[in-house]
Amino acid sequence: MMNLKLSGLFLILVSSVITSCDKKQSDSAPYNVIKTGNPPIAWIARTDMEGKNLWMTGKAVLDPTDSTKFVVTSDGNELVNTDQGGVDILTKEKYGDVHVELEVMIPMNGNSGVYLMGEYEVQIWDSYSKPVILENQWFGTITATKEPDVHVEKGGGEWQTLAIDFKAPRFGANGVKTANALFEKVVLNGHVIHENVAVGAPTPVCLTGRESAKGPLMFQGFVGPVAYRHINIVPVDAEQVLLMAVIQFSNRIRILRPSNLGCSPIRW
C-alpha cells in the first residue's frame, strides 16, 4: 500500500514538473524554433535584443489601406516579420562557405538585411521609391563596403530574388585571420550586382562583431516588416569545389576529344 502511495506521489510530482516546464516554455514562446522550407531550416529569434519576437510563418501581402505594412495570414510557409520594434532571427545551424538563394519582399519604405554568418550584411531597403539615396542605402549594398554595380531593385510589395555565393574568412592555426570574408557573387533579380568583394570587418550593427570560421544566416527584424520565402542554404566545402572543377574540366576535355571533332581517335 505504501508503494502505491509513493508511486502516486511520484506521478503527481512528475506531472507537476512537466506542467511547470510546459509553462516555462510557453512563457518563452517568442523564442521557440520556427521551421521553414523543405528540407526544413530551423530559425531562432535573438534574445539579446530589446523588442518582441514578431516573426511567424504565414503569407504576407501588401496592406491595401497602408502600403508601408503587410497583411499576414497563417496559411503559408513564408518567414514574416510583421511590424516594427521586433528582433532579428537566425538559423540554428552555422555555416562557413555557403550558397544562399531566397526571395524577399518589403513594403514601401521597408528595411531589413541578410547577414552572412550573422556579421556581413547585404542591405534590404526600399531604395526603389526614394528620389535621393544616401551612401550605402541602395537595395543590395554590402553595408559599409560597396554599392551594387547596377540598380535592379523592385518596388515595395514585390517579391525579389537574391542569390549569394559567400566565402568565410580564413584563420591560421594560431587563430590569426589569413583571408577576409568574400562575397564571390551576389545576384539580384537575375542581375549580377557584386563580384569578388572582400569584407575586412563585420558590419557595424551585426550579431557579435567578431569574425570566425562559421556563423548563422541572420535576417534583420527590428526596423520593420519583411517577408522571406524559398530560402535555400547550401554549405560549400573545399572538396565540393574541387569536385565541381574536375567535372567542368572533364566536360571540356570530352568536348575536345578527336571523335567529337570528326577525327579518328588515336589507338595505342
Image (cartoon, rainbow, N blue to C red):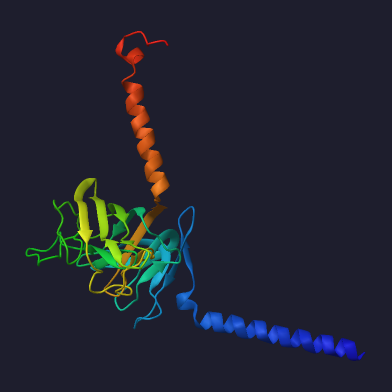
Q: Is residue 14 above or below residue 258?
A: below
Residue 65 visible in this rendered orientation of the protein: no
Q: Is residue 258 above or below residue 151?
A: above
The residue lying at 36 percent from left, 55 percent from top is: 97
Give residue 37's position: percent from left, percent from top. 45, 55
Q: Is residue 149 above or below residue 14?
A: above
Residue 110 visible in this rendered orientation of the protein: yes
Q: Depth check: 116 or 7 in front?
A: 116
Give residue 211's position: percent from left, percent from top. 31, 69
Give residue 132's position: percent from left, percent from top. 6, 65
Quadrant in which the C terminus is drawn: top left
Q: Depth check: 58 or 25 in front?
A: 25
Q: Depth check: 226 or 143 in front?
A: 143
Quadrant in which the N terminus is drawn: bottom right
Residue extending farthest to the left is 132
Q: Quadrant of residue 30?
A: bottom left
Q: Depth check: 106 or 7 in front?
A: 7
Give left or right: position of 20 versus 63. Answer: right
The residue lying at 26 percent from left, 65 percent from top is: 121
Q: Quadrant of residue 147?
A: bottom left
Q: Quadrant of residue 167?
A: bottom left
Give residue 206's position: percent from left, percent from top. 29, 72
Q: Is residue 140 above or below residue 52?
A: above
Count of picture labels: 0
Residue extending farthest to the right is 1
The residue lying at 83 percent from left, 85 percent from top is: 7
The residue lying at 66 percent from left, 81 percent from top is: 18
